[in-house]
Image: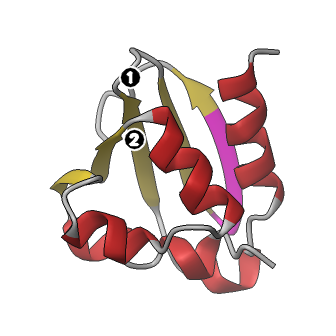
């Protein structure tokens, strides 16, 4: 498992199914280094996929360092977005739920 894969596995491991009640969504991640993964949420479960999803609800673009910092809680995702370190395409409001869906702890 690559470092990037383990980061995504860590994120999915923190998934809060209660926060996802009634949510059907696909969060596509595209890292500047070329890695693409997605987290698909359906029926209170989250599955991780590698590559590009056919119909992502929102796509988040960032570099690996930013992803690590947000995952570790060093950087607030919304602040990183406002600072231009994270770019989003699609349902941007959905991206605001990430902190509750995948709490840092």
48 to 3, vertically: above or below: below
Q: Position of residue 46 (x, y in %)?
A: 68, 53
Bin the neighbour count of mark 1 within 10 Å (Cα to Cα): few under 14, some 14-19, many 20 and up: some
| Residues marked 1 and 2 touching at CB (< 8 Å) | yes
Which residue was labeled with disc 2?
A: 28
If you read the primary sequence from the N terminus, does the residue marked by circle 1 or circle 2 appear first?
2
- Quick one: quadrant of the C terminus? bottom right
**Magenta span contains residue 61:** no
55 displayed left or right of 98 = left
Q: Position of residue 94 (x, y in %)?
A: 33, 71
The circle on residue 52 is 1
**How has the structure been colored for display?**
secondary structure
- Quick one: quadrant of the N terminus? top right
**Magenta span contains residue 44:** yes
Q: Position of residue 33 (x, y in %)?
A: 41, 18
Which secondary structure is most common in the magenta stretch?
strand
Residue at position x 75%, y 16% from top? 2
Helix, strand or loop under label 2: strand
């Amino acid at each position: 498992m690559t470092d990037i894969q383990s980061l995504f596995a860590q994120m999915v491991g923190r998934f809060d199914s209660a926060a996802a009640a009634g949510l059907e969504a696909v969060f596509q991640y595209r890292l500047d280094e070329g890695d693409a993964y997605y987290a698909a949420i359906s029926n209170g479960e989250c599955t991780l996929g590698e590559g590009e999803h056919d119909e992502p609800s929102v796509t988040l673009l960032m570099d690996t360092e930013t992803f690590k910092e947000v995952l570790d809680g060093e950087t607030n995702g919304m602040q990183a977005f406002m600072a231009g370190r994270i770019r989003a395409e699609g349902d941007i409001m959905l991206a605001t739920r990430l902190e509750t869906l995948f709490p840092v702890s």
